[in-house]
Structure formats: structure tokens, C-alpha cells
Amino acid sequence: MLNVLHAVQQNPVVMQAVFVDQRQPLDAATVESLFELPNWSESGSNRRRVEARIVTYWRDLLQDLEGH
């Protein structure tokens, strides 16, 4: 759902800095900005609730990792 491979293929120079270059510390906002939000399912649907939960977990993970 997050299309990490696609992001790497479409933005290799930017993603290289994420995975290799350590000159600037990464923060949650920088990593999140590299990804596009999904094409959401219909509002109010079960699928949409699952998608929203996954995106929330992703953002929470980034925040947790930034805190360590």
C-alpha cells in the first residue's frame, strides 16, 4: 500500500539520501513527505476505515522511530 519500491524507482536520488546519506538526520516529516497518500476507497466504507487505520499506524511508527 505504501509503494516503497515505486518511490525508490521514481525518485532514486531523493531516496538514496533516505537510505544512504547520513549528513542530515531524518525526521518523521521528511520520510512521510516522500510518500503519497493512497487513492482512498469510498468514504464511510469498511475498506476506507482500514486504509485510514493503516495510514495512522504508519504515521505513528514514523513518530515512534523519530523519538528513539
Image (cartoon, rainbow, N blue to C red):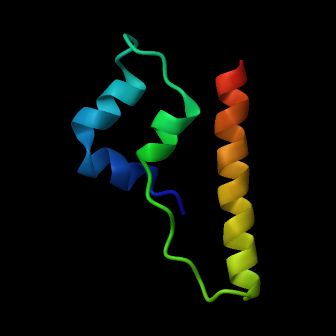
Image x and y of residue 43, in percent: 66, 86
In this rendering, would 12 be left or right of 47?
A: left
Check the image and report above or below for 19 versus 43: above
Farthest top residue?
23
**Residue at 64% from the left image edge and 37% from the top image edge:** 62
Image x and y of residue 66, in percent: 65, 25
Q: Foreground residue, 32 or 15?
A: 32
Q: Quadrant of the C terminus?
A: top right
In this rendering, would 25 be left or right of 41?
A: left
Check the image and report above or below for 66 versus 25: below
Disc tally is 0
Image x and y of residue 54, in percent: 69, 60
**Residue at 39% from the left image edge and 50% from the top image edge:** 5
**Residue at 73% from the left image edge and 31% from the top image edge:** 64
**Residue at 54% from the left image edge and 63% from the top image edge:** 1
Image x and y of residue 45, in percent: 73, 88
Residue 18 sits in quarter: top left
